[in-house]
Image (spheres, rainbow, N blue to C red):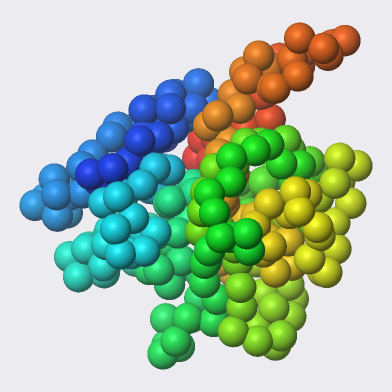
């Protein structure tokens, strides 16, 4: 059986595309990095891929706002390509800056809404944060999270605080199963109430670290699963009495590849 093919979309400033491609290759997929201008010139290239991935980094230096310039490019030139991944039972993954791009594309929500019901904005403390966080997977139908209960992953961002337009939006996201991944304590306990820093590293509402669309096939998260692929990536690996075969993040990529198995 042919390997699922993953399109890693990069732009000036993207800096996690190589690691993300390696993660998909470890999981059994065939990952190919394509520059956004190359895809704009030949949108038909996307037809040969089962997964679209927006990797982390600082696309266009986050000069206007995190992810906004690339999202605008995609909306103007490649909206049909993005929609094809959403409507053809293919998968879309966004990591950190990739999640920010996806939020600004609006692909998690009903396209008929004139104003986005949620966004990612500056961390509560108003600065860049880089640390490891505990995560709890919700009862999500997302292919990316099958068999995952808890994870420990690194995060590194300045604009990762998830906020909704109103309380009704938050309730709708929960009822639709879109709140896929939350910051938690070490035991996997989380809450609808915002947990204190550093358990919740940015002040996100619902302690949200990852969001899906209603189908579950479109998934974005702020932490970096591609930075915890090996047991030795764990910050305390020398102090652990037993070593798992892989780091927590690899499961997300394995799930994406297995979806097409």
Query: In what quadrant of the picture does the N terminus appear?
Result: top left
Q: Is residue 163 left or right of residue 64?
A: right
Place of residue 114 in the rendered image (x, y in percent of width and height, measured from the top left): 41, 90
Q: Is residue 172 left or right of residue 161?
A: right
Place of residue 163 in the rendered image (x, y in percent of width and height, measured from the top left): 61, 73
Residue 9 image-quadrant placement: top left
The residue that appears at 74% across and 76% down in the rendered structure is 175
Residue 130 vs 184, above or below: the answer is: above
Place of residue 125 in the rendered image (x, y in percent of width and height, measured from the top left): 63, 59
Residue 155 image-quadrant placement: top right
Place of residue 144 in the rendered image (x, y in percent of width and height, measured from the top left): 60, 46
Hey, which residue is sitting farthest left in the picture?
A: 41
Disc tally is 0
The residue that appears at 38% across and 68% down in the rendered structure is 105
The reply to whether residue 147 is in sight is: no
Q: Is residue 153 left or right of residue 68?
A: right
The residue that appears at 69% across and 78% down in the rendered structure is 170
The reply to whether residue 96 is in sight is: yes
């Amino acid at each position: 059986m042919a390997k699922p093919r993953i399109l890693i979309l990069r732009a000036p400033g993207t800096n996690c595309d190589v690691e993300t491609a390696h993660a998909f290759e470890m999981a059994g997929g065939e990952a190919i990095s394509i520059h956004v201008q190359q895809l704009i010139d030949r949108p038909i290239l996307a037809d040969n891929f089962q997964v679209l991935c927006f990797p982390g980094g600082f696309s266009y230096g986050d000069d206007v706002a995190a992810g906004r310039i690339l999202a605008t490019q995609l909306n103007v030139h490649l909206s049909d390509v993005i929609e094809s991944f959403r409507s053809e039972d293919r998968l879309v993954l966004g990591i950190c800056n990739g999640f920010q791009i996806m939020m600004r594309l609006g692909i998690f929500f009903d396209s008929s809404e004139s104003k986005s019901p949620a966004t990612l904005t500056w961390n509560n403390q108003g600065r860049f944060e880089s640390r490891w966080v505990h995560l709890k997977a919700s009862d999500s139908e997302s292919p990316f999270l099958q068999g995952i209960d808890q994870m420990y992953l690194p995060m590194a961002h300045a604009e990762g605080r998830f906020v909704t337009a109103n309380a009704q939006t938050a309730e709708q996201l929960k009822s639709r199963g879109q709140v896929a991944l939350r910051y938690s304590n070490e035991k996997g306990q989380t809450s609808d109430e915002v947990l204190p820093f550093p358990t919740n590293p940015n002040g996100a509402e619902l302690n949200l670290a990852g969001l899906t669309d209603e189908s579950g096939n479109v998934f974005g998260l702020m932490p970096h699963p591609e930075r915890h692929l090996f047991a030795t990536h764990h910050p305390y690996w020398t102090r652990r009495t037993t070593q798992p075969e892989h780091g927590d993040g690899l499961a997300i990529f394995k799930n994406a590849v297995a979806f097409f198995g």
